Amino acid sequence: MKIEDLRIVENPTLVRDHAVEKLRDAISTGFYKPGTRLVERELCEALGVSRTSVREAMRQLQAENLVTVGPRRNISVTVLSPEDAEDIYVLREMIEAKAVHRLVRRNDQAVISELTGLWKDMQKAIRKNDLPTLSKMAGAFNEAVLRGSGSKVIHDTGLQLLKRVSYLRLASMSEPGRLEGGMEEWDAMMDAVERRDADAAAEAMARHVRESRQAIVSRLNAERDAEREAS
Amino acid sequence: MKIEDLRIVENPTLVRDHAVEKLRDAISTGFYKPGTRLVERELCEALGVSRTSVREAMRQLQAENLVTVGPRRNISVTVLSPEDAEDIYVLREMIEAKAVHRLVRRNDQAVISELTGLWKDMQKAIRKNDLPTLSKMAGAFNEAVLRGSGSKVIHDTGLQLLKRVSYLRLASMSEPGRLEGGMEEWDAMMDAVERRDADAAAEAMARHVRESRQAIVSRLNAERDAEREAS
DNA sequence: TTTTTTATGATTGTCATACAAACTAGCAAA
DNA sequence: TTTGCTAGTTTGTATGACAATCATAAAAAA
């Protein structure tokens, strides 16, 4: 044991951070659907905290583009236009490809083991056709990749984009044929990672995000058409 | 005059937004240098607002990575490690190249005119060797490019990265030879824009960011070495 | 009945206080 | 020199207050 191991790192969780996490979760799981109006007082009651904390949490979520302030100052869960969603995927394609590339280049065994572990769990979930679990793990996988890049900037920027579309992931995976396709792309990527072929891994990741994007976009357009039909 | 022109858009500026702007400015101009500790009470006095507003402003700046909370909860202006700075430029290279590409593709005359206007002003500032003005305008130019992409996502993401390194811009431009080099790259880009050659414009932009990155990194490393020397 | 006014709440932005917890720094005691 | 104590700082959180704006329902006027 080294002297550094004595250092106490954990500070008591802040109420506002907890609030941010809870709200982020509520949004990404679809409990608060896009467009839902969020009223301060109600959030205070629901979370059991004061306005101070709720307001500070809102400022953070606002900066993360997860909530949007309307013309009357009222806050609602951001609704992602199909165009914005598509653009987020376009950026993700660039950033996550770069992340994988670095990850392979860094050749950190711990990180790579973590990825292969996650990948095996995902394969299990796929065989069981357990979409909710798969969705969660796909999120963890993406995060692990960003973290594995070893760059705080890549991690933060990528994660911010990821969080904005996380509520779409489940829908994306239920698009017909997407599961098989996604599996194939992941296979290709992990294969490249195992071979320590950074370029191939990056390209596989890019392809994966690209395909996901197409699935999402067609899904969102279908929804939009359905709405138009109804109105 | 059309009926839309009647719409009242401006809502009275919020105190906290004003505070955020002021603080952002103070950071990017170097008034608050990286590492400076920001004490709530002092900010309240300096800005003439209540703790509520300062705290909410801090949450936003925190989410933008312009300030960092330390282990004792105290907030200071983020110090960018050379690695982080380099990574920001790496992402900027990808994003701003994409932005220019779209900008050219959109072929929006108003936007392109704005750019050429800015470019001419920048040339003037270069001839006068007026670095502070040039720095400001380079920032405006970058923002105009991001805005001109027509994508809110590209704009927001790019701007966030831009703001994090804006305090480095002036230093970057005073690197020997950087002014001439930057001028050449901008020339090439604007030329490609005029020719409506999206690919060439994107490549020129990428080259520009890449060269800027190298200037910055060598600058930061020099600073770091000087510090090591001193200690 | 339809339109206009008025009154009543709701919601948000801002401020002022208050207090606890954690930390800092300096002084006193051993 | 070390230890222990004390007072002051800084931050996180809660609460209450109030103005401005907006929404809605009720009342008055046409």
Image: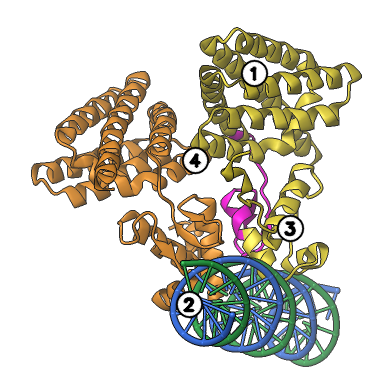
Chain colours: A yellow, B orange, C blue, D green
Residue B165, quarter of the rendered image: top left
Q: Amino acid at mark 4?
A: Thr
Q: CA distance from mark 1 to mark 2?
A: 49 Å
**Residue B192 at x, y = what percent?**
28, 23
Viewer-proximal residue, A205 or A38?
Answer: A205
Q: In which quadrant is the N terminus of chain B drawn?
A: bottom left
Magenta stretch holds residue A78? yes
State the residue position of label 4.
B157
* Dot 3: chain letter: A
Question: Is D7 situated above or below B64?
Answer: below
Residue A180, quarter of the rendered image: top right
Viewer-proximal residue, B191 or C25?
Answer: C25
Q: CA distance from mark 1 to mark 4?
A: 21 Å
Magenta stretch holds residue B84? no
The mark that comes first in sequence, 4 or 2, is 2
The mark that comes first in sequence, 3 or 1, is 3
Depth check, mark 4 against mark 3: the one in front is: 4
Q: Secondary structure at mark 3?
A: strand
State the residue position of label 3.
A37
Q: CA distance from mark 3 to mark 1?
A: 34 Å
Depth check, mark 3 against mark 1: the one in front is: 1
**Residue A86 at x, y = what percent?**
60, 30
